[in-house]
Amino acid sequence: MNSESLEQIISDYKKDFSRISSEEVYKWEAIQWFQERWDINAENFTEMLTNSFAKADNLLTARNYFPKGMLIEFSNKDSEAVRAMFLDLFDESKEVVERVDTFIRTSQNLLEKYGEESWKQHYQTANSISTYLFFRYPDSYYLYKPQKFKKMAVKIEFPELPKRGRTESIKAYFSMCEEIRSAIMKDEELCKMSQQRLGDKHYPDNAFHILTDDIIYFGSRYEPENSEWWPGETSYHPDITTEQWLDLLHNKKVFTNDSLTIMKRLLDNGGQATCTELSQKYGESKGFYNIGSSSLAKRVHKETNCPLLTKDDDSNSKWWPVLYVGKNATKNEVGSYIWRLRPELKEALEKTDLSQIPLYTQKETEDSTRQYWWLNANPKTWSFSSLRIGEEQNFTLYNITGNKRKIFQNFLDANADDYVIGYESTPVKQVVALGRIVQENDGEHLPVEKLESLSEPIDYSTLKGIKELEGMEYFQNPNGTLFKLTKEEYDVIMDIIREQNPLPQAKEELPAYTKEDFLDQVYLDEIHYDTLMSLLKHKKNIILQGAPGVGKTYTAKRLAYALIGTEDEERIEFIQFHQNYSYEDFIMGYKPHGDGFDLRYGVFYQFCKKAESNPDDKYVFIIDEINRGNLSKIFGELLMLIEKEYRGTKVTMAYNGLPFSVPANLYIIGMMNTADRSLAMIDYALRRRFSFFDMAPAFDSEGFKKYQTGLDNEMLDEVIAEIKMLNQDIASDPSLGAGFCIGHSYFSGQTNCTEEWLSEVIEYDILPMLREYWFDEVEKVRKWESRLRGVLHD
């Protein structure tokens, strides 16, 4: 055993004694409470049992762990049997492992004899049984928990570790405890500190067994830290990994441009700085960094539900520790408080391309010669939204009768590189694009280039109600084509546009996504990937179908990345169908607005327009639960247009009378859950327009095996083995079949496998599904409940 490591743990326990004592002293009180009330010969044994363990709290009751509750249930059914169990357990003439095993066997017998619908398992394990022994003989025993034992043993280099499913490990734990207790008793200061906190309602702990176990509990969670920085690892951590930070950094709803600016400047400054230092070195006010950081932390918390420091108020000190650790600045340093990027966040930032984010604040230099224009297009004549990015449209200065266009002077005044707001009139009545004047008129034409499509067009009614735009030339008299905007009017409109349409991420910032990336992340072999990609490219419409948890959604997203060639979220749209989803939601329809109704365009219509204006790029539309909607009603006349042979073919839309087509560069990926018995089979009209790809659980794939091996967790290995046998049972059931098997994704995506996580997956994902599968086969459900729970509590 490494005595230096143990001494360091004990030293830090003493430093943090006040906080630890306030949180853990309940154990001394709970044991004293038990000592004063336990009476094996009590006439009402159940009442005595309940009262004796009343203050055990989380020691005997936790999430998915209810040993005390089950003991009371057993005693309500057969109190004498439970009394006999404790008589045997507390018989010190017998070997402890033998007593623990007997207690477990008897509990299983009672569960089988009196089992009820609400009884999931007996929960009597080496952990809970050691608690009963600890409460009864606190000067002889300790609180055994395998994970606590393992973590502490590794830190102090104790030669033995717990073995799963082996109650003999309890003896090894007691042996480690005794060695640690010997070291504790040599520390007179520590022993005195512990005794001084105890009163009449606490167990005196003269043998220091409770203190020993408390230090082991502290040590199992202990990480050495530099106390100079706050908060320390043992007191708070947001539990966000580098990989999660990388995902967040690419989420524009979380990391805005301002947030990335703060991050880039901190990183450039060595990863730490005061707000004053950042302000003086890079520009912006101190509040920009202070308020910006707390706002960012709030968005991170909202997105991840990460833990927060325990604070009753909403002060910054509750939020910024999500991003940083901090310390007071010295007299020689600028500012008062230094923030340092958390190492996981810093590592993620170092892997992120921030070249498009400005390092220093640049003062805007307004070009006094640039002008701004509102271009009014009649969509029944030509559509601004249908133009490709970079495509030009020539506007004639004279109409077909040879007369000058209205406000003719505007055509003459327009100069090269003037900015244009692209508006489509009735029935669209929306700003749909941005452009620029290519060159001055040649006496007959004025060429305008489309620079950007708006994925979220801006309604006429939105702009009309803004006071700053009341004097806009177009609003004064909308008859005409080209209208002048002031710089102030243009800025107001652009502010509204950018609220709904943030500047697109520069393509060079996005990493390439290859076939190798797909195979590394998705548990499919190369042959299946090639088949899947070939189907998507040639059919343009595919449906991934399979049982719950086979990774349909995860695969669809990464298949889209592989098709596009990069992780460009701007070129992917994800929706979910439901029984009330309609054509009006998907394509277009009239929606209430004020005192009347406005024509609104649906998500698919807008995404098609976006793809149409960027024909050189691939776009992917992903539909989850595609068979939950009434597909004929949702797609309407577009049911034909999604076919490969009809891509690019225009039809006139019923609502607005305008031509529309589904572009050839748009691909559709649907997903179906084959285990959903509430849904009818998908109709033939849609089936013949899609290729269907079956997905199965991938527990035996090389990728999943590599992932499972990397977690190195015996409990997970045993659970997976049970799930594979469960799938055999499901597949052989005539009323179910392979389409109902349990998928691998329930157990994927973890960097650290814990018993709590596995328990949640089994209790709240797997077992409810089995009860639905075998709703009329109670015994089969119970068998699998017992087998799966048995792995966790063996």
Image (cartoon, grey):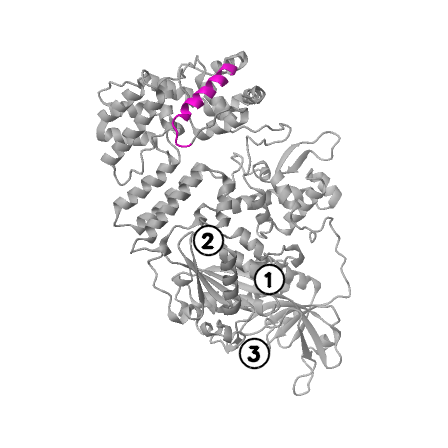
Q: Is residue 544 magenta?
A: no
> Which SS class for mark 2?
loop
Q: Quadrant of residue 54?
A: top left
Disc 3 residue type (three-letter): Lys
Q: Which residue is mark 3?
A: 380
- Compare marks 3 and 1 and give the one earlier in the sequence: 3
The answer to whether any part of residue 657 appears in the image is: no
Q: Is residue 65 found left or right of 271 in the rendered image?
A: left
CA–CA distance in space, label 3 to label 1 = 28 Å
Q: Is residue 51 found left or right of 548 in the rendered image?
A: left
Residue 677 shows which numbered tag?
none
Please name which of the two marks, 2 or 3, marks the residue nearer to the observer. 2
Q: Which residues are magenta?
A: 164-183
Please name which of the two marks, 2 or 1, marks the residue nearer to the observer. 2
> Which SS class for mark 3?
loop
The answer to the question of whether label 2 and label 3 lie on touching residues, with beta carbons closer than 8 A, is no
Q: Is residue 658 found left or right of 675 in the rendered image?
A: right
